[in-house]
Amino acid sequence: MVDRSIAARTQVGRRPGRYVLRGVVTAYLFFLVAWPLYLVGRNAFADGFTNLNDILTDPDVTHALRLTVVIAVTAVVINTVFGVGISILLVRYDFPGKRALNALLDMPLSVSPIVVGLALVLVYGGRDGWFGPTLEAAGLQIIFAVPGMVLATVFVALPLVIREVVPVLQEVGDEQEQAARSLGANALQTFRRITLPSIKWGVIYGVVLSLARSLGEFGAVKVVSGNVLGQTRTATLVVEEKYLNFDKGGAYATAFLLALVAVACIIVVSVLRPKEDR
Amino acid sequence: MTSTTLVPDRPAGNRRSARGGLPLTRVSGLGLGVAMVWFSLLVLIPLAAVAVTASQGGWSGFWRTVTNEQTAATIRLTVGTALLVTLVNIVMGTLIAWVLVRDRFFGKRALEILIDVPFALPTIVAGLVLLSLYGPGSPLGVNIANTRIAVFLAFLFVTLPFIVRTVQPVLAELDREAEEAAASLGASRYTTFRRIILPSLTPAIAAGAALSFARAVGEYGSLVLLSGNLPMRTEVASVRILSSIENDNPDSAAAVAVVLLAISLAVIVVLDVIQRRVMRRG
């Protein structure tokens, strides 16, 4: 290696070391991700389409799938509105506590989902939560009901839109917004005509990633849902329940559906992104 | 992904945010108020509730709970395995990022997608996915289900994207001239890597490592089916918290949760410090 010439050393793609690294990386990803992922697909279709057919005609499972979609979409809408708003505030405005807020917004990414669930139960739990009994007296049950599951899902996916939109907002700068404002546009017009079109792609990536994360949330939802069959059971909870009840075919088929959506989300983002970046 | 917070490849943006911004107007002030109320109700108050609940038994109560033999074992296993996984990720993540940036070959795009799969895949499905290759009936003929290796493997799977995605953009922006200069002055490739490339990657690697450590420490979903959750052997901290909740013992659940929250908070502080250092340099 030492006596090889400088030219060869700096040239791209001619070194044996390169093939070794390429091989190591490919093998690592093959054994850690690709092969296991493929096996789930194969197990789901081990008996042809029977597994998939069984779960799609099971009213409890279809209810769970519908509930999952409703919760995920609600959570994504909330996170998108909140995320775009807070991103604009963080990038364009100055206020006390901005740095602390910026750091705290990342918190949900590094908190255990079980802790998220516990935290929500302690505050909104109907029996002895801080606000729970009051809300329940007013007729609003949160824990062991859909609102709590939405809250848990919103919590875990909270930073994703923000983390996509903030860098885009920083990149585009505020010259155009200033120009629009000096030409007499009000805040809403400036946002709709100038800001929103320029951050469009950031928002779309954020939405797709949040959707994937929200559809797949398990731990936090498990704690706050109570997992009531036909009422508060989501798709990820179905996977667990089916597997533990020795209905492996059903578990693999449901897992396959969830994996399909997740991989589709990743592919959508990866296909869209280069157009913007390069 | 999460990497965007740490990517120091947007100098214009960094300068802008360092400069601050406009003072709040009436509309934006109202917006900030609404956002803060929502953020408090959703995140800050519930997390405070965990801390308050944990402190109700006093310091001795807290200490007794977290040093309980079974609980201490779960914390040791979780933190120990997370550290080990983070070390593996530091090496493999940097290597993967290197290959994705510097190499060009057929199928690279597919590898790019594989990196993000663990991030988007539901954790319970991640557990099932690993079980199908490394569990009973494995085509490889291994069965690591219900062992500590399963915990390691699950952590490794779910933390895969973090270091790759923080290092990749930094590596892509790196100035090749310094490397060529070093090589032309006779530095070996190892020396060039250690003296020229590695120092510029260190903040990104550290940031990715912090994220991956935090993610591993809080992991739950992928372990449910994979590790068997055997007390004293494969039970992790999150599982311990959940069983305390299910046994209607929120005080001890909160005590263990505070330990995990302290780790998350430490990670956030580390990230903030790294980000600020990178920004100042840029």
Image (cartoon, rainbow, N blue to C red):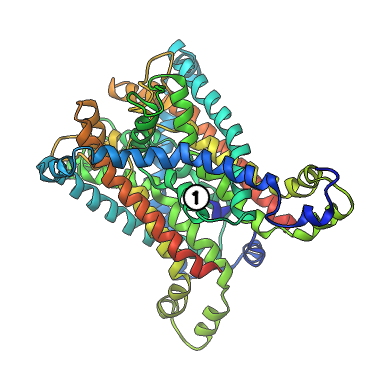
Q: From the viewer's side, name the closer residue of A70 and A54.
A: A54
Residue in front for this viewpoint, B113 or A138 = B113
Taking the view exactly as shown, the residue that stands out farthest to the top is B69
Point out residue B49 in the picture as x, y percentages from the top left corner.
Answer: 40, 34
Is residue B198 visible in this depiction of the protein? yes
Q: Is residue A66 above or below residue A61?
A: below
To which quarter of the image does residue A253 belong? top left
In the visual, does A58 lie left or right of B64?
left
Q: Amino acid at mark 1?
A: Leu
Seen at 29% across and 51% down, the residue is A72
Residue B122, how many percent across, how many down?
35, 42
| Label 1: few (<14), some (14–19) or many (≥20) C-alpha neighbours in 10 Å | some
Quadrant of the snapshot with the N terminus of chain A:
top right
Q: Is residue B30 visible?
A: no
Point out residue A53 in the picture as x, y percentages from the top left corner: 14, 44
Quadrant position of residue B36: bottom left
- Mark count: 1
Vertical relation: B76 (above or below) B21: above
Q: Residue at x 56, y 75 (%)?
A: A174
**Residue under label 1:** B111
Q: Is residue A215 left or right of residue B262?
A: left
- Is the C terminus of chain A in the top left, top right, bottom left or bottom right quadrant? bottom right
Q: Judging from the image, what secondary structure is the residue with disc 1 in?
A: helix
The residue closer to the viewer here, B109 or B196, is: B109
Residue A102 in picture, x, y percent from top left = 54, 52
Q: Is residue B277 toward the left or the right of residue A169 in the image?
A: right
Q: Chain of mark 1?
A: B
Residue in view at x 60 percent, y 48 percent: B97
Q: In the rendered image of this protein, does residue A174 appear above or below residue B49?
A: below
